Amino acid sequence: MTTLLRTDRLSKTFDGKEAVKDISMTIRQGEIYGFLGPNGAGKTTVMKMITGLVRPSAGEIEFLGNPVRAGQSLELLKRMGCIIEYPVFYDRLSGRENLELHGEYMGYYNPEAVDNALSAVGLDLRDSRPVKQYSLGMKQRLGIARAMMTRPELLILDEPINGLDPVGIREMRELFRRLSRDYGMTLLISSHILGEIEQIADTIGVIRSGRLVREVAMEEVRGRDTDYIELVTPD
Ligand code: ATP
């Protein structure tokens, strides 16, 4: 499979403290990459460096063959949809109005893109309720729809399942599968709970104290005697 994103010895130091150290990872086109690690392990910092929100202290990032730098061009950013922390919306506007406003502000509004993004995430195109009446799961979907308006190659989702109830978790997993299968999207999804991502991830990268301690190809361990839980939860 083609490489979509590659990091090479990516590191970040905050006030002398190493939050991320020498992370080299490869995400292939079309895969779901689960980024697993406890709170504070450095997942968000890696994601922010990938999207250019945080400047790395050292290391390189390559996306679609182009180097990624903090403050990168809008053109490259459009190809990378990113939902870090809970997405924020105009509460009194409907989901559709939020997407329209966002598209206009960013200079890429078109009604078809709004319709496509809403239906991709399974939201009702005619729902006129204000977003303040949305459940957390619906807001997460709307956040994904907003990120999808530019049809990015890569979606980066920071703990998207956090706080959802069991039904919401199942629906969210189904959505990720659909985005991968029907839309050919590549997904980078972080989580601190293995059970949230093990069923959908093609690869799981385990991060501990800022280091990538293991990468497991799920195809190789699923359905075998290997106790992969041991593989993805090293001491
Ligand atoms: P969580 O799920 O809790 O967000 P995480 O794996 O995403 O965890 P990060 O948020 O990337 O972890 O944090 C990694 C480490 O870097 C933590 O020790 C955190 O306190 C530190 N850190 C993150 N951002 C900053 C910052 N802007 N200034 C100082 N330290 C920071």
Image (cartoon, rainbow, N blue to C red):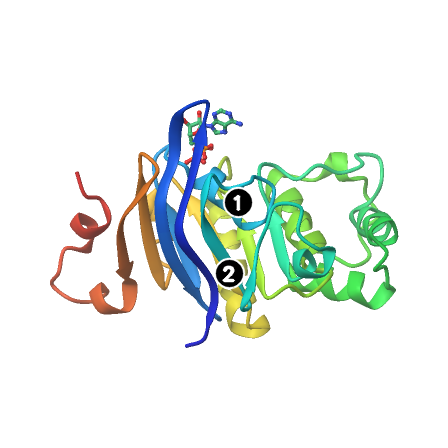
Q: Position of residue 48 (x, y in %)?
A: 54, 42
Q: Position of residue 25 (x, y in %)?
A: 37, 57
Pick the residue in front: 164 or 106. 106
Say whether residue 117 is visible.
yes
Tell me the amino acid under the disc marked 2. Answer: Glu
Q: Earlier in the sequence, mark 2 or mark 1?
A: 1
Q: Residue at x 84, y 35 (%)?
A: 92
Tag 1's secondary structure? helix
Tell me the amino acid under the disc marked 1. Answer: Met
Q: Residue at x 74, y 36 (%)?
A: 133
Q: Is residue 105 left or right of residue 5?
A: right
Q: Residue at x 54, y 52 (%)?
A: 156
Q: Which residue is mark 2?
A: 62
Q: Residues within 10 Å of mark 1 (few under 14, many from 20)?
A: many
Q: Is residue 122 above or below residue 10?
A: below
Q: Residues within 10 Å of mark 2 (few under 14, many from 20)?
A: some
Q: Position of residue 230 (x, y in %)?
A: 16, 48
Q: Which residue is mark 1?
A: 49
Label 1 near label 2: C-beta < 8 Å? no
Quadrant of residue 73 in the image?
bottom right
Q: Is mark 2 within 8 Å of ligand 1?
A: no
Tag 2's secondary structure? strand
Pick the residue in front: 137 or 226. 226
Which residue occupies the extreme bottom position in the image? 1
Q: Is residue 27 left or right of residue 107?
A: left
Report how far apart the C-alphas of labels 2 and 1 lie in the structure. Answer: 11 Å
Say whether residue 165 is visible.
no
Q: Is residue 59 above or below residue 12?
A: below
Q: Position of residue 196 (x, y in %)?
A: 39, 47
| Image quadrant in which the C terminus is located | top left
Q: Residue at x 70, y 40 (%)?
A: 134
Q: Is residue 95 above or below residue 162?
A: below
